[in-house]
Image: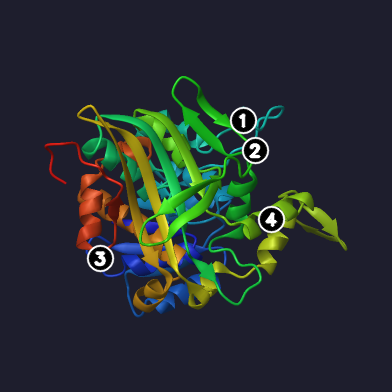
Amino acid sequence: MKVLLVGVGTVGEAIARLSRGRPWLERMVLADYDLDRARRVGAGLGDDATYAVARIDAGDAAQVAELARAHGVDLVVNAVDPRFVMPVFEGAFAAGVDYLDMAMSLSSPHPTDPFTEPGVKLGDLQFARSGAWVERGRLALVGMGMDPGLSDVFAAYAAKHFFDEIDEVNVRDGGDLRIEGYPFAPVFSIWTTIEECLNPPVAWERGRGWYTMAPFAEPEHFVFPEGIGPVECVHVEHEEVLLVPRWLDAGKVTFKYALGDEFIDVLRTLHKLGLDSTRPVRVKGVEVAPRDLVAAVTPDPATVGDAMKGRAIVGTWVTGRKDGRAREAYLYQMCDAEWTMREHGLQAVAWQTGFNPVLAMELLAEGAWRGAGVLGPEAFDPDPYLELMDIRGIHHAVSRLEEPAGTAS
């Protein structure tokens, strides 16, 4: 497989590193707006002719298409901010190649009732183009990171193996991950953090469809495994809620994240001051978007790996029935920040996000996953994915699973 990797920031670098030496990878073009960064990442991979570097403007679909054609790639992998999803997505389509991303096209709130009704939802712009991708016989695999991504695979696995009927699919992310020595430091892109945390979160219910609420709504204490215990989680806008109901039959789908009171207070303050805005303002003759300024003055997540301590858990909590009996299961992946730095030289969230598109690329290259159109992870058989995690020695587990009488665990 020949791959054009658009963006070699925190996650893009992880994808490049974790793909190195895989027999299915024939070529990977490391493309970034910052050519020096692409060169540094390439140099870190050693003297490996599998990799090439190039400069690209991810906001220009024509550049994406031109670079994909020039290198004869089979797949464009989008590892840049969600604001660039559509030009990279359209560039891959124009080049006639497959596409993979980890975050979907951006939403926009309902113009008059943002905390009740959704406006343009995450992924709507991409799903509107699915028919064209089907006609061309090409695949756009969307939301294939950690969450969305593995969290959706977990939902599909639970539906296939653990339940006859599903009441709820609830993604719950938390742990005890922290960054020491900084007054404020996000574990991933602050631009994306602001986007998903301050937008109206979305939930889905059978008979009601998608609906929204105020940011940080309905706090609950979810008991995380691995000895972590109860951690408060709140509603956050996330792609799983927009993906799961398209392929799995569930009564309700939600996403909640353990942000912490201090982090929420910072985000609320940014919002009150207008520092979350993406509309440029003039400052001493210079046009700058407030959110870009915030991103510039917060630590780069790629540089704080050594300061990260603790564990991050991403999981999917499913409730329903098996053989007529009520049951629940929490399928999850746990990573330890010090382990990821020691073993891979990657901070925890970068590794946790980056290994998933690498696994998906292997399944696509080998034909275990195939399809056409705009498809989420739930559209594919989850079994080969979890089997590949086992082969690669990547942790995943199930807790809370109560087996009906007469069945083996």
In this view of the protein, which residue sits in the foreground, 401 or 264?
Answer: 401
Between circles 2 and 1, the one closer to the viewer is: 2
- The CA span between labels 3 and 1 is 42 Å
The disc, 4 or 3, on the residue closer to the chain's N-terminal end is: 3
The disc, 2 or 3, on the residue closer to the chain's N-terminal end is: 3
- Where residue 330 appears, as percent x and y from the top left, is 34, 47
- The CA span between labels 4 and 3 is 43 Å
Between circles 1 and 4, the one closer to the viewer is: 4
- The CA span between labels 2 and 1 is 14 Å
Mark 2 in CB contact with mark 1 (< 8 angstroms): no
In this view of the protein, which residue sits in the foreground, 15 or 334?
Answer: 334
**Residue in the picture at 70% in, 62% down:** 294
The disc, 1 or 4, on the residue closer to the chain's N-terminal end is: 1
SS at badge 3? loop
Q: Residues within 10 Å of mark 2 (few under 14, many from 20)?
A: some
- The CA span between labels 2 and 3 is 44 Å
Disc 2 residue type (three-letter): Ala
Would you name the residue on which mark 2 appears? 214
Rendered image: mark on residue 22: 3
Disc 4 residue type (three-letter): Asp
Would you name the residue on which mark 4 appears? 265
**Residue in the picture at 25% in, 58% down:** 389
Q: Residues within 10 Å of mark 3 (few under 14, many from 20)?
A: few
- Where residue 62 appears, as percent x and y from the top left, is 53, 48
Would you name the residue on which mark 1 appears? 119
The disc, 4 or 2, on the residue closer to the chain's N-terminal end is: 2
In the image, farthest residue toward the right: 284
Disc 1 residue type (three-letter): Gly
Q: Is residue 187 above or below residue 43?
A: above
